[in-house]
Amino acid sequence: MSQLPLRAQLASALGRTAATLSRATGRGDGSVIGGRVGLMLEPDLLRKLAADRKLVLVSATNGKTTTTRLITSALQELGEVATNAFGANMPAGHVSALASAKDAPYGVLEVDEKYLPEVLDTTQAGIVCLMNLSRDQMDRAGEIWQLAQKWRRALSGKPAHVIANCDDPLVTWGASTAAQVTWVAAGQRWREDSWCCPECGGPLDRSASGAAWACRECPFRRPEPSWVLDGEDVIDPRGARWRLDIQLPGEANRSNAAMALAVTEAFWLDPARALPRLRMVTSVAGRYTMVERDGRALRLLLAKNPAGWLEAFDVADPALPIILSVNAQGPDGRDTSWLWDVDYRVLAGRPVLVAGERRLDLALRLAVAGVPFQVCDSFQQAMALVPPGRADVIANYTAFQQIRAEFGRAI
Ligand SMILES: [Zn+2]
């Protein structure tokens, strides 16, 4: 790639130094502070670092870290890939990711939904991957509709090729102003935020299979997909069927893999070459990791919002005990009223242990759902109450980080 201007080189180098210092002093992985320092010195740094690279931006409410990882793994087949592997998904994190792989011809960046317009404007990325939009913590349907509206404005008139999940009506609406869209029928488990047509507010009807949807009052309907996720398989635009066989568990990850295959084909990488690389990914930033202690093997699942809880339920083994841990710190959102949006009845029949700062809120929710449970003062106590053997853990953001810190940062 072409040489950065001197000022940008300096900003980028100082940013990397700040990141190293931050890591050395134990203040995290350094990707945010390094990027912030770089941006302070050169506000135009992200644009400069992005120039001359083939970039993918990945955005969604759920699954963006995992999908970023899957796409990165596949594109490594073609060459070096810069990526924000640790979920630092705002511009400072993007600066840090690109600065730490200066010569990588490819970049895959996870982007916070709200930052997508700004990051697309700045980086002029050629590919944008959009997967799902649902309420997250304090958000409600109206706010995510506004977010999709911002995506529409940002994509309109841009040359970017968008790869979007057409099973999600709001994503479809958000993507449909783009000049070029490849539609992927990647599934939609959480539907509570898509009863209404984003275009006119009319009711959305679903086909008998539940896959297709159409507005009853205006022409807005699901576009014809080029790629289709069908159970364990993905069907490509030529009609060829590919068994996914990825190691990451659950339907949500098969959906992420389908999106990743459609994205990598935009780089002329066919599924025969991309799939083996998707299968190499076993865990993402600690998610799905098994941790072991005192004869217990716990599998860690992260769930940050109602849709994420449904995905985690899909992965959790009904035959095993399950520990639920919910906190309400800044990154989690202090309001945990979203607990009432989740149907916990699926947990009935297995031992359920409840921990975390908001264990009493969660306990009340489970009591109303008729799910027997036991409240624990701490995660350690919950673990001690699980019989030796395997168990699942579902935790929201800071609860998950605390558990990872306790067991060491398995990646
Ligand atoms: Zn409509």
Image (cartoon, rainbow, N blue to C red):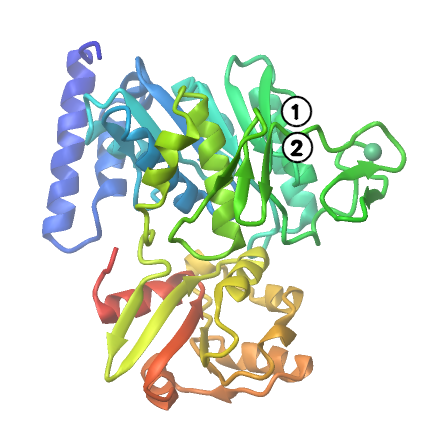
Note whether residue 57 is visible: yes
Q: Is residue 35 left or right of residue 328?
A: left
Quarter the N terminus occupies: top left
Name the residue beneath numbered marker 1. Answer: 176
- Label annotation for residue 88: none
Note whether residue 116 is visible: no
Ligand 1 falls in which quarter? Answer: top right
**Residue 166 in the image: x percent, y percent?**
65, 35
Callout 2 amino acid: Thr
* Residue 101 figure quarter: top left
Work out how far the residue at label 1 is from the one at label 2, CA to CA, in angstroms.
6 Å
Instruction: Tell me if mark 1 has few (under 14), some (14-19) or many (20+) residues whose alpha carbon lies within 10 angstroms of its own.
Output: many
**Residue 283 in the image: x percent, y percent?**
33, 54
- Between 138 and 43, the residue placed more toward the observer is 138
Callout 1 amino acid: Ser
- Between 183 and 169, the residue placed more toward the observer is 183
Which element is circle 1 on?
loop
Residue 187, compared with residue 399, is above or below; it is: above
Residue 64, compared with residue 335, is above or below; it is: above
